Image (tube, coloured by chain):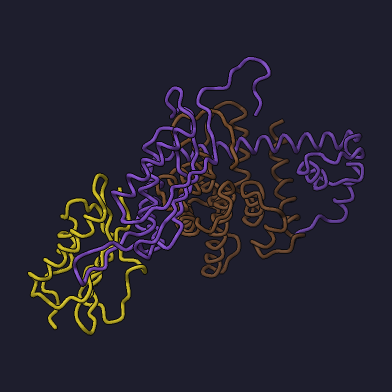
Amino acid sequence: MWRSTPRSLAEEQSRLSGHTIEDLNDYLDRGRTPSDSSIDDSPACTVALTRLERLRAALRRVDSAAVDREAERTDGWVATIIDSIRLETRAGRRIPLTSDSPVARLALTEGAVIGVLRTAGDGIDGILISRCRLEGDVTEPGEPITVRLDVSVGTDGMNTGESVRDLTARLRAAVYAVLVQQTELTIAAVDITVTDLYLTTALPTSEGEADE
Amino acid sequence: MSEPAIAPDRLDDYILAVPGVDALYPAGPLLTTVVASVVSALIPSVAAPNPIVVVERAGGLSISASIGVGPDHAAPDVCRRVHDAIAEHFSRAGDPVIVEIAVTVARIG
Amino acid sequence: MTTVTRLAVPSALDAASDALLADRAADGDVRAFEVLVRRHGPLMRVHATRILGSNDETDDVVQESFITAWRQLPTLENGAAVKSWLMRICGRKSIDRVRARRDHADITETDAAAPATLTPHHVAETQEQAEALARCLAELPDDQRRCWTLRELGEYSYTDIAEELDLPVSTVRGLLARARKTLLRELEDWR
């Protein structure tokens, strides 16, 4: 294990008005709060802080250059990763389907249903479904099921004069249609919660309107 | 009981030929209630695990497959057609006693 | 219902928030996961390479990390924290590799070679400086470089680094201090 020798540490402290480089680095980590006049008023400390900040800035450039280089790679590393997870579908519960055959045991996975509902949402401009839950016992035929959707809405998907409510009504209709075509579930309700709202056109640039 | 006479990789092709089926998935724990010995489904030269599991039980064969359904198809119908295709395949391959054909749709669209 | 207002975004999933992508990926959406891979994979690759000391095993470590992430995403409670969560998985996998390597080779200071990516260019001085610093960082002793990258890229606390590397906190502080001194000296050479 390594430690500063007492002598070099003492030299450093006497040079930096009783502080070490480590103290100063911690001070920067804290965002210089609470402010410490024994550091701020020391010319030697100020010089050392400037050096540390220069180092931080230079290393940020090093890091972002390295990240950029990796992002430019075209050797298919992303595809390799995606291929390796594609077969690992999220099954969830087993949703039975009817059949005339006495030996048949047919089913949809809950994951398949959630996936196709997500796709239905993506088919509507301005809608992105983030979460989808099937509430109720889907493993029991005929049980009433409530579909709960958390969605992100972008106003660019709205037709002129259309409200968020109109847009979610379109989503609800699309979701019902998919559920009828793709499942044998008994749907009690489709509950949609808008958790996120995106504005399309930039906010008016006139002064004082940019309240985030 | 006779073993299925046709190699399961043929069965793969048979299932993939069913309109609407665009993928076969490795049968997951959701499906496999493997109580008896796994028959010839785990064939030699396994580059990829065979997605169709054929299990020999006391009363006969139990067959499991997990499929992906392409867009513009109704998954329940495709699922039933896959069941029919499996039944037909085995009836032509010596017609062994079948106690269960489990088909699961793991992805739609 | 909480509503967050943000500025417009061009293409739906590519511009979606980490939280939304993480939620979708947790629900099984491969496309959303792919956006996360493209968005955070490059930083994870840099992180893994620095901990490993070379890029020989970077592909494997990053791939393993994402496979683990895919499986465990449903357990991630706050999707907005997916970046640091991914960095943790990646850091841990990289350290596991280093440990496995030690068990096999019984040496502590392996692969002193600089990464192949650092070919010298004659460009603007800041870039030369950046490259010199990058080289300096790559040539730090393994334990110093590992602490440094966990701190700076992984955003670990000193205590977390100590736990992850199974070292006393005081040692971690010492290693980071030494690395900092070396890097500061390198920077001074460019005055």
One can see residue C61 in this view: yes
Query: Can residue C63 be seen by looking at this rendering?
Result: no
Q: Is residue B87 left or right of residue A16?
A: left
- How far across and down, in percent of the image, does residue C88 sit? 58, 55
The tint of chain A in the picture is purple
Q: Is residue A160 above or below residue B62?
A: above
Q: Nearer the viewer, residue C77 or A121?
A: A121
Residue in the foreground of this view, choosing between A46 and C2: C2
What residue lies at 65% left-to-right and 49% top-to-bottom? C155
Q: Quarter-wise, where is residue A63 in the image?
A: top right
User: As drawn, is B106 to the left or to the right of A196?
Assistant: left
> In the shown orientation, is residue A46 left or right of residue A121?
right
Provide the letter of the chain coloured yellow: B
Task: Point out residue C29 in the picture as x, y percentages from the top left corner.
Answer: 41, 49
Given residues B102 and A162, the one toward you in this image is A162
Q: Colour of chain C?
A: brown
| Residue at the image position 65 percent from the left and 57 percent from the top | C143
* x then y, percent, for residue A106: 27, 64
Q: Quadrant of the N terminus of chain B?
A: bottom left
Q: Quadrant of residue C164?
A: bottom right
Residue C46 horizontal/vertical position (percent): 54, 46
